[in-house]
Amino acid sequence: MASLIAASVFFLLIHFGVSGTRMRDGLIARMGERPYRAAFGIASLAGTIWLVIAYRHAPNIVLWGQLISLRPLAYVVVLIAFLFVVIGVTTVNPTRVGMEAKLADGAAVVRGITRITRHPFLWGVALWALMHLIINGDLASLFLFGSLLLLALGGTASIDAKRRRSFPSQWESFARATSSVPFAAVFSGRNQLGPALSEIGGLKLLLAVVIYVVAFVIHGRLGHPLT
């Protein structure tokens, strides 16, 4: 368990202590954008691998136990998570790495899933991690999925801060047309759900469902439920 705790601390520290902070800005000024991204990517990958390996070797310490009765709900929530993730990574979005220049388009770049949330991928990860944390009910899962949940939720604020510092005027125009919290911009009248659904299109929805089903089948054949 000590290794899992250390991995969780390292994983969160490199993201919240470096990425999204002024330390990141300083490192980029010294190293350059590409070398920084490469170094951070390696550190992040190493942290992820360490976290997964430590989780697999952690002792089974039961907290509230597996909540089998919640699995039907979990399947629905995880499907929504897959929709957010798949549609998110296939949509042009200034909050994604390498797409910062799209902020120059202002509110015009807000289309499809970004009308619902400007952080679809991170919210998908957050929903997935939350359901795994709740359903498994053990200490190791609390550290693994809790770390991923904190990273996903904290990442939304971190990315917003980075974009706001780097593109102050362009960011405000973009941010006014969308929201971090899913559907907040829609409910507040700053955007509309109808155009979002038509712009997403059936192909992206189908792709997300297919990937979800494939993941479901693979988990089943490995002897593990999707959650």
Image (cartoon, rainbow, N blue to C red):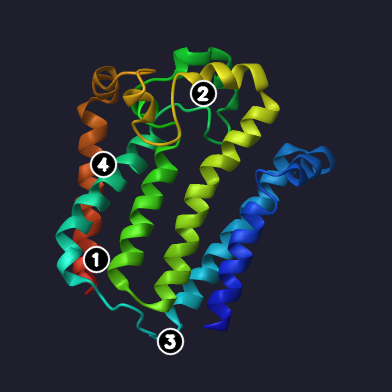
Write down the residue under mark 4.
Answer: 208
Q: Which label sits on residue 175? A: 2
Of the two numbered discs 3 and 1 on the same chain, state the one appearing first in sequence.
3
User: Distance between the Cα atoms at labels 1 and 2?
Assistant: 38 Å
Q: Residue at x 36, y 23 (%)?
A: 188
Q: Earlier in the sequence, mark 4 or mark 1?
A: 4
In the image, what residue occupies the spot 32% across and 25% down? 187
Q: Which of marks 3 and 1 is in front?
A: 3
* Neighbourhood count class around disc 2 (C-alpha, 10 Å): few under 14, some 14–19, many 20 upward: some
Amino acid found under the numbered disc labelled 1 = His
Q: Residues within 10 Å of mark 1 (few under 14, many from 20)?
A: some
Extreme residue in the right direction? 30
Which residue carries the number 3 mark? 59
Q: Is residue 45 above or below residue 9?
A: above
Q: How far apart are marks 3 and 2 (CA)?
A: 44 Å
Q: In the displayed structure, does residue 106 sit left or right of residue 89?
A: right
Q: In the rendered image, which quarter contains the C terminus?
A: bottom left
| Residue at mark 3 to residue at mark 1: CA–CA distance | 21 Å
- Who is closer to the viewer here, 205 or 125? 125
